[in-house]
Image (spheres, helix red, strand yellow):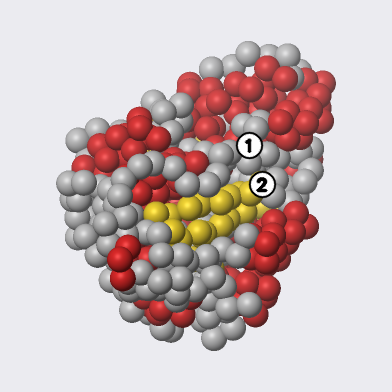
Amino acid sequence: MSKTSVRVLAAASVLALAAACGSGSSGSGGGGSSSNSGGNTASAPGVTATTVTIGSHQPLTGIAAPGYSEIAPASKAYFDWVNAHGGVNGRKIIYKYLDDAYDPSKTVNVVKQLVVQDKVFGIFNGLGTPTHEQVLNFLNSQQIPDLFVASGCLCWNQPSKYPETFGWQPDYTVEGKILGKYIADKFHGQKIAIFAQNDDFGKNGVKGLQDEVPASQIATTQYYDPTNTTITPLVQKLQNSGAKVVVSFSVPAFTALLMLTSGELHFAPQLVVSNVGSDPITLSGLLESFAKQGGATVNGQQLIQGIITDGYLPSSADPSNSWIKLFKKVLAKYDPKAPLDGNTEYGMAAAYTFVQALQAAGQNPTRQSLVQAVEQSHFTGPALVPFAYSSSSHAGMTGTQMGVIHGLSVHYTGQPETTDDGNGPITPYTTAPPTAPANGVPTG
């Protein structure tokens, strides 16, 4: 690609992404009877004798839509699966997710609509660090359960300030520490550069990385603005630093832009990309789409080979895994056009945890009983590492596992590792996840 092509690409990508993926469906689906509804009452807003209505804000369009717009439909597909097996305590789950286009100002309006007009029981898996930060105070002041935010920001784990809010995935500092330990071991003494989103997502990740990588190895740190796709000056600084390794805390669109711009500058470092920006199918498709907009043709799958990344759910490269088998069945029945990739797996796995929480909240759940159920939980499921939930911790998973992209999937190496967001050690975690339940529904 020519330099002109990259400039055209950067200018055009926002318009292309704004139209990407359209909008997702919402509402309830699936069949099945509500066999336990006889003793059920309308115990809380959003809860009737036969239904529980929850809501979410999601980037169905805009810069974060590629890949991420798959998450909520996949969650809904899993809820539909549960509904078809009798629901939770005789109630079907109705999932309403609205588009905020990864725009914080729109997130506020979307969430207020869900709470005030739609009167949802709680917010589930609201996606994005800069977006969800804008509704934290509102949700907590209204005592709305705010479960399993789709972001690894440290900010979700503040139970005294935000008692309704819980993370789900590993926080970015935990992830950054584990990435940093791997880099310090494998690339000892080599210069590395950091490319990160200029918000708590990127800064939390950089903090974890700096805990493990000696300062003398970090040649430069460049932060990108997610509203500005012109990143050539930033990539030039990465290149001029002399770094042989670039660590990226980026959403998929900016991972793709980083790779294409680096190629244009004949800059070929080893890439280490945090989990949120490295889904192989999403990234391969974005590379080909963006290159085409710039008048070039690339093989996206070929370009992503060898990227170092990490994960905390079973690899789709293991078709014998019971969770992968279950998720394939769910998608085939309720979201058949979607691929089984990191995004759809994420959506279904998070939905599985929500079903566990709703089961534990009791026959006639209240908002308070739902929050208490998570705090008192010992949830297991497809996650490779345990959750940290307690009355004093609203953090999600406690670690991750390193891997490398081969083909269109991540192949894990070594063992999952756990740590904290402070000075705690990084330790191997050797307990395997349980087998998926035969009917795909938690046993409670």
Other residues around mark 1 within 10 Å, as few (<14) / some (14–19) / many (≥20): some
Q: Toward the viewer: 403 or 263? A: 403
**How far apart are the alpha carbons under marks 1 and 2?**
7 Å
Give the residue pinned by disc 1. 23
Q: Is residue 157 above or below residue 284?
A: below
Give the residue pinned by disc 2. 99
Q: Residue at x 44, y 42 (%)?
A: 29
Q: Amino acid at mark 2?
A: Asp
Q: Residue at x 33, y 73 (%)?
A: 362
Q: Is residue 381 above or below residue 13?
A: below
Q: Residue at x 56, y 63 (%)?
A: 120
Other residues around mark 2 within 10 Å, as few (<14) / some (14–19) / many (≥20): many
Q: Secondary structure at mark 2?
A: strand
Q: Is residue 376 above or below residue 426?
A: below
Q: Toward the viewer: 86 or 7? A: 86
Q: Which image quadrant is residue 65 in?
A: top right
Residue 320 in picture, x, y percent from top left: 19, 35
| Direction from residue 270 to residue 257 in the image, left or right | right
Residue 231 in picture, x, y percent from top left: 75, 39
Q: Which image quadrant is residue 262 in?
A: top right
The mark that comes first in sequence, 1 or 2, is 1
